[in-house]
């Protein structure tokens, strides 16, 4: 099949309206960058999902990170995306401006070096991410343990994506099929999607981030809908094995165990968080029970945006009182947040 | 946040490698993959998460062959 035929097919589609959710923020970005929406029929709607770990982090988590940044004997290490997410007393970026010790990191392994070099201080790491990121934290904390480095704490907001997809299927039945997250699938593989695809009878297709990948995934989803199928298909075999990265799954299971976690905008989802376990639990910086979430700021529709009820530009604050330079709600904050992506690509 | 970027392994020492990203050489942990020098790997948060099977051009050619295959199965 040629790409031209696929585009012609998707452009000419004139059946019932179809809604497909791209779970991952990187797919939302790719869909804009490649201009895919203009190549397909208006009857095929693409909905942005909850796939930005920063955007789903609850307020209590930011507040816990802030405690470490403000305590006298500790320093907080974080990725840049987390800096602007609002907490009860402002964002980490605001706190840094007021003199709190917040340092940006580029890789979690930096924390081990810093902590080894300065054993009298606590280095708290804001460990946020989905399955793509969890193995790095597992390797890093394993290394800290092996080297006897004790002055590291992980404040984890590590989440797994399949319980969230299950939640969306149960609560948003209007979504017809899913573009599964490419780099999460590198770790977990395709198998975990089968149970959800069967339970809710929704097609789930794994794909990469090039324009061709996204066109192919849409074609596959539309064809499955036309045939009444709900299959899991891997269209990213260059990077995703059916069984995933087994070594990564092993280190992840060695250091972490699942438990309930709070998702900003969705609420609590059982078994969707990953927490340090066993011998590794001494490295936990107080990650459990961070359930309190700010009421979303009045007028912010992030809860509806990440569950596909509204498009970002349907929020009355979008582009007026809420912009990436002056975000009002969490979905505008991160480079991967649905509102931020829509704004930058208007 | 979950973006992983392809780089080429240029040296290996146990579980630590140096990878080339369009001329930038970066330290990468290879604890969860079996990498060889010359492999293209996907890197996320300082960690190589998978070895890429083929180059991008070949991958996209295969992608459309795969779609043909899926159509024929019906
Ligand atoms: S535009 Fe701003 S206020 Fe509206 S949903 Fe998005 S983040 Fe919330």
Image (tube, rainbow, N blue to C red):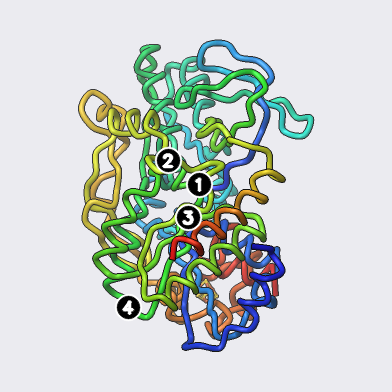
Find disc 2 in the rendering and name its residue.
A187
**Element type at marker 1?**
helix
Question: How far apart are labels 3 and 1 at the CA level?
Answer: 9 Å
Which residue is at 40% across, 19% downward? A144
Q: Which mark is residue A206?
A: 3
Question: How far apart are labels 4 and 2 at the CA level?
Answer: 27 Å
Q: Which chain contains the residue that carries disc 3? A: A
Question: How far apart are labels 4 and 1 at the CA level?
Answer: 25 Å
Marks 3 and 1, the one that precedes in the sequence: 1
**Element type at marker 2?**
helix
Q: Are marks 3 and 1 on the same chain?
A: yes
Question: How far apart are labels 2 and 3 at the CA level?
Answer: 12 Å
On the rendered structure, is A280 left or right of A31? Answer: left
- Asked if marks 2 and 1 touch (Cβ < 8 Å), the reply is yes
Q: Quadrant of the C terminus of chain A?
A: bottom right
Find disc 4 in the rendering and name its residue.
A173
| Residue A140: percent from left, percent from top | 43, 26
In the current view of this chain or complex, which residue is farthest to the right?
B23
Q: Are marks 4 and 2 on the same chain?
A: yes
Marks 4 and 2, the one that precedes in the sequence: 4
- Asked if marks 2 and 3 touch (Cβ < 8 Å), the reply is no
Q: Which mark is residue A183?
A: 1
């Amino acid at each position: 099949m040629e790409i031209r035929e696929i585009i012609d097919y998707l452009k000419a589609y004139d059946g019932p309206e179809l809604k497909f959710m791209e779970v991952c923020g990187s797919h939302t970005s790719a869909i804009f960058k490649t201009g895919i929406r203009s190549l397909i029929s208006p009857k095929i709607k693409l909905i942005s999902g909850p796939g930005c770990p920063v955007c789903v982090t609850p307020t209590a988590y930011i507040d816990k990170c802030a405690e470490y940044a403000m305590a006298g004997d500790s320093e907080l290490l974080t990725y840049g995306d987390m800096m602007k997410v609002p907490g009860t007393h402002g964002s980490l970026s605001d706190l840094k401006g007021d003199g709190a010790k917040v340092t940006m990191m580029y890789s979690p392994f930096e924390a081990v070096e810093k902590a080894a070099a300065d054993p009298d201080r606590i280095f708290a790491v804001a460990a946020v991410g989905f399955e793509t990121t969890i193995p790095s934290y597992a390797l890093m904390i394993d290394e800290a343990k092996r080297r006897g480095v004790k002055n590291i704490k992980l404040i984890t907001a590590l989440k797994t994506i399949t319980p969230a997809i299950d939640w969306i299927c149960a609560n948003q039945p209007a979504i017809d099929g899913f573009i599964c997250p490419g780099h999460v699938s590198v770790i977990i593989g395709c198998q975990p999607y089968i149970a959800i695809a069967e339970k809710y009878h929704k097609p789930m297709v794994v794909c990469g981030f090039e324009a061709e990948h996204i066109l192919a995934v849409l074609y596959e989803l539309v064809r499955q809908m036309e045939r009444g199928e709900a299959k899991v298909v891997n269209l990213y075999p260059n990077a995703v094995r059916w069984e995933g990265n087994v070594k990564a799954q092993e280190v992840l299971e060695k250091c972490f165990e699942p438990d309930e976690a709070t998702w900003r905008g969705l609420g609590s989802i059982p078994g969707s968080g990953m927490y340090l376990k066993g011998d590794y639990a001494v490295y936990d910086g107080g990650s459990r029970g961070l359930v309190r979430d700010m009421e979303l700021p009045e007028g912010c529709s992030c809860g509806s945006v990440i569950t596909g009820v509204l498009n970002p530009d349907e929020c009355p604050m979008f582009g007026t009182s809420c912009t990436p330079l002056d975000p009002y709600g969490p979905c505008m904050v991160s480079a991967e947040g649905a509102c931020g992506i829509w704004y930058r690509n208007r | 946040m979950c973006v992983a970027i392809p780089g080429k392994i240029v040296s290996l020492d146990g579980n630590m490698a140096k990878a080339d990203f369009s001329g930038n050489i970066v330290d990468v942990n290879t604890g969860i993959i079996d990498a060889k020098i010359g492999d293209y790997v996907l890197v996320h948060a300082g960690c190589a998460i998978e070895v890429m099977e083929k180059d991008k051009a070949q991958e996209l050619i295969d992608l459309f062959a795969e779609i043909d295959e899926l159509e024929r199965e019906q």
